[in-house]
Image: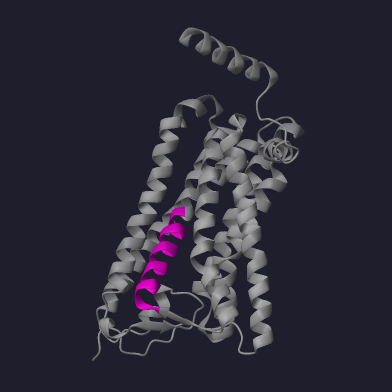
Amino acid sequence: MSNSSSISQFLLLAFADRRELQLLHFWLFLGIYLAALLGNGLIITTIACDHHLHTPMYFFLLNLSLLDLGSISTTLPKAMANSLWDNTNMSYNKCAAQTFFFLFLIAGEFYLLTIMSYDRYVAICKPLHYGTLLGSRACVHMAAAAWGTGFLTALLHTANTFSLPLCQGNALDQFFCEIPQILKLSCSHSYLREIGLLVVSACLAFGCFVFMVVSYVEIFRAVLRIPSEQGRHKAFSTCLPHLSVVSLFISTAIFAYLKPPSISSPPLDLVVSFLYSVVPPAVNPLIYSMRNQELKASLKKWWNGQSFWSDHEKYMVMYFMTETMLHEK
């Protein structure tokens, strides 16, 4: 029996064998990656520069864009390089690093989406306590908890998976390094330990999913009690982007891992994994920017080269700068 240390590299699954299709995939992946970089980068820049958007909802959205940028950057550049150079090899250490970072960012994103549902719940169901429950310190702690939990989850799974002996070859039926595909190469009963960790993680994810469902049930009940139609429309508009992102994220992930074995095949698995790992990070900025009027206004202001500061705020800044200079003299 050979152990994992005897494997120096893995063979990833190619999207196509013909050179013309490989180049077509490269340009398609490049377009998607640039769109994801542009969309998430604009959201991060706008929220960071516009002090009117320094609220809990946009703080969490900024973190979501950072996680989206990181997750798509762990998988798509390598897929682009494979399609361009027709080389599907990946070293053992790079595979372990890709597995860790992808799982870290995806898990962190899911936990952050759970926190964002709590933010919407407090904003609509407990508006008078919004500033107390979601102060700046509480928001930082919750975001840090999402990142930290994702980090610990990825560390446990990656360390356990890559400590298993592998003797079923080195070919992965996936375009990036993924734990279920690596477990197929294991020939030791130690893989049951990783399956146990996966079950624990699945239970934690299911708990987060139940929390989101309960939060939105309470939100819809509160919205339906709003007397004015305009108020109901505004409340729904603030929830719809988050609900759309959650639905896209969960539906693609569930179909990727829980689809019936009878319809499973390497080409279909490749397409489905592409949908859940690449499409959400690229589409999330579009979903949020289309439905959020404040974000659209700030993006338009940034695009037109206008300042995020009001005239009064500019005057106050200039006043304090002048006073400081006079005091130094």
Q: Which of the colour schemes (rainbow, by chain, secondary structure, one colour) is used?
A: one colour
Question: As rendered, which of 74 and 190 lies closer to the eye?
Answer: 74
Quarter of the picture holding the N terminus: bottom left
Where in the figure is residue 225, as x and y percent of width and height?
65, 34
Membership of 152 in magenta stretch: no
Residue 117 at least partly seen: no
Which of these two is toward me, 261 or 45?
45
Q: How many marks?
A: 0
Q: Position of residue 286 (x, y in %)?
A: 68, 52
Instruction: Between residue 258 and residue 165, name the one nearer to us.
Output: 165
The answer to whether 296 appears left or right of 83 in the picture is right
Q: Residue 212 vs residue 148: left or right?
A: right
Q: Is residue 308 above or below residue 101?
A: above
Q: Is residue 97 magenta?
A: yes
Q: Residue at x 36, y 79 (%)?
A: 183
When the figure is inspected, residue 319 is found, relative to residue 223, above or below; the finding is above
Q: Is residue 103 above or below residue 140?
A: below
Say whether residue 28 is visible. Answer: yes
Query: Which is nearer the eye, 226 or 80?
Result: 80
Seen at 66% across and 37% down, the residue is 235
Lateral position of residue 287 relative to residue 168, left or right: right
Which segment is the magenta one?
A: 91-108
Residue 95 picture quarter: bottom left
- SS assignment for the magenta stretch, majority: helix
